[in-house]
Image (cartoon, helix red, strand yellow):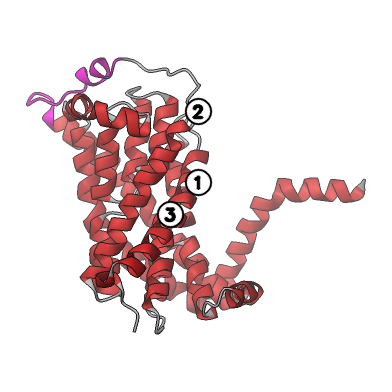
Amino acid sequence: MKANLYVVKLKKNILPLIFLGFTLCLLIFPKSNLPAVKSGLTLWATSVVPSLFPFFISTELLMHTNIVNILGNLLNKYMKPLFNIRGEGAFAFIMGIISGYPVGAKIASNFRKNNICSKEECERLLSFTNNSGPLFIVGTVGILMFGSTTIGLLLFITHILAGISVGIIFRFWKRNKSSDYSNSNLNLENKTVSFSNLGEVLADSITNSISTILLIGGFVVIFSSVISILKSSGLLHILSTCISPLFNAINIDTSFIGPFLCGILEITNGINSISLIACKKLSINIIFTAFLLGFGGISVLLQVLSITSKTDLSIKPYIYGKLLQGIIASVYTYIFINVIPFFNFDI
């Protein structure tokens, strides 16, 4: 009876204990934590803000135009049979591909707030429209980290193909549930931008975008600090040691464990570490990177959760979809590398 009582108390107080432990670790490991926080801030200011902030504003502005309805009319014949989503969902898919995390999730949530798509359709959108953008995959990962545009293109192609595959699979998500939505034209007509309200619409778009970009910056900094604490405390090494037998069994160098675990937490730091591992079979580095790009990391998951928590959307399809996308992207990458000689980078 006492044991059960202790378990209940532990479950009830697990988050306060984690937050207390995090606070203590900030005091215990200041030398390693401060540079990590500075690095996180630099990463956010030099990479995230320039690449995402303009897209956030543009998507907010486009939501005040008829572009969603136009895409809906044009692409409904493709979106409905493939993804079981009305044509308006194409806007979330296209902008999610162009912009990167977490634009797809933000648009899906906006669709739900404006009742453009049903709850089930928005949850399907969550499963496959929140993707890494070409600027990050080709530019940051391919060129800056791996030093190869071709690797960036390979990862982008398999990333998008995996996202489409997940969307097709999730067309069956809650397909028997009744849809509740209003006429999308009616929802958007009252918000359509004109010269008379341009200033107000632009101001609102910038304000909403600043809120989102600051939120992302906070997550980047926090997870940079968490990764630093895990390394300094030795917890990452202990976890790596526990997992090493599995990697040995499948004949993969154990030096990938630490960076891979970091990538599960925050993809930018993890992928950068993976790209620096010297390995004769570069395909292993690329396949691990493909999984992390598809999965997105816990940092992005929490960013999405902070957005969807303001709606009635479930986070489950996003979690299942991103895990599945990571696995499928890895498989596609493996196939491309082994079938197409142009994409084989092994020494």
Type of the residue with mark 2: Lys
**Residue found at x 28% / y 57%:** 157
SS for callout 2: loop
Residue at the extreme left: 195
- Residue drawn at x 20%, y 49% is 54
Name the mark on residue 328.
3
In the image, residue 78 above or below residue 56: above
N-terminal of the pair, mark 1 or mark 2, is 2
Other-residue count near label 2 (Cα within 10 Å), few / some / many at <14 / 14–19 / ≥20: some
Q: Nearest the camera: 65 or 78?
A: 78
Magenta stretch in the rendered image: 183-198
Q: Quadrant of the C terminus?
A: bottom left
Camera-near label (1 vs 2) is 2
Q: Nearer the viewer, residue 107 or 33?
A: 107
- The residue that appears at 57% across and 73% down in the rendered structure is 250
Q: Tell me if mark 1 has few (under 14), some (14-19) or many (20+) residues whose alpha carbon lies within 10 angstroms of its own.
A: some
- Residue 106 visible, this angle: yes
Q: Position of residue 210 (x, y in %)?
A: 28, 46
* Number of the front mark, 3 or 2: 3
Q: Residues within 10 Å of mark 3 (few under 14, many from 20)?
A: many
Q: What mark, if any, has residue 319 been given in the picture? A: 1
Q: Secondary structure at mark 1?
A: helix
Determine which quarter of the picture holds residue 81: top left
